[in-house]
Image (cartoon, rainbow, N blue to C red):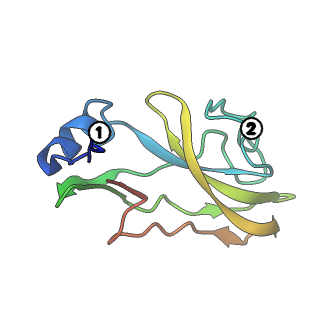
Amino acid sequence: MPTAVFVKINAAIEPLFEAVNAGSDTWAIALSASAPANATFTPGTTDLATGGGYTQGGNSAAVSSATQSAGTYKLVLTSPTAWTASGGGFTFRYALLVNSTNSNVIGYWDYGSSQVVAAAETVTVTLDGTNGVFQAT
């Protein structure tokens, strides 16, 4: 018997991902000192606790677009507001992409080492407005 080849139906990609509501879910970027151990997000445990200018749960990142083109689904989020440290500041290493609707960490950006943010310093996480936070084919 010959080997079968899978053929993707491009128009099915967006409905597939929209079935889990990625385009209408609530999203956030949260900061953490450690990489998440699993996909479950618990504010104040998975991310930093409230203090020093950071609020547990992270900052909202609104959906700018959620589209499919040529079989590639792309989720574009607006960049969250910046965090300005106060008091003793805070330290983080990871910026987490959080689906706040279902409390899942989808992925994260690793800054490579701990980032110490002193009082009055600002942390800005700039998301890619062209390529999105993720693409799936």
In the image, 11 versus 50, the foreground residue is 11
The x and y percentages for residue 20 are: 33, 30
**Residue position marked by numbered label 2 in the rendering:** 37
Q: Is residue 25 left or right of residue 56?
A: left
Gap in angstroms between the C-alphas marked 1 and 2: 24 Å
Which quadrant is the N terminus positioned in?
A: top left
Q: Residue furthest right?
A: 88
- Give the image quarter of residue 87: bottom right
Place residue 117 in its image quadrant.
bottom right
Q: Nearer the viewer, residue 33 or 134?
A: 134
Residue 117: tell me if it is visible: no
Identify which residue is drawn at 72% across, 72% down.
121
Q: Tell me where residue 82 appears, x and y as whole percent.
A: 56, 63
Q: Residue 36 at what x, y percent from top left?
A: 71, 42
Residue at the far left in the pictured view: 11
Within 10 Å of the Cα at label 1, are there few (<14), some (14-19), or many (20+) other Cα atoms?
some
- Residue that appears at 47% across and 27% down: 102
The vertical placement of 39 against 5, above or below, is above
Q: Amino acid at mark 1?
A: Phe
Circle 1 SS class: helix
- Residue at the disc numbered 1: 17
- Camera-side residue: 78 or 102? 102
Q: Quadrant of residue 37?
A: top right
User: What residue is at 37 percent from the left and 63 percent from the top?
Assistant: 132
Q: Amino acid at mark 2?
A: Ala
- The image shows residue 2 at horizontal and vertical percentages of 27, 44
Nearer the N terminus, badge 1 or badge 2?
Answer: 1
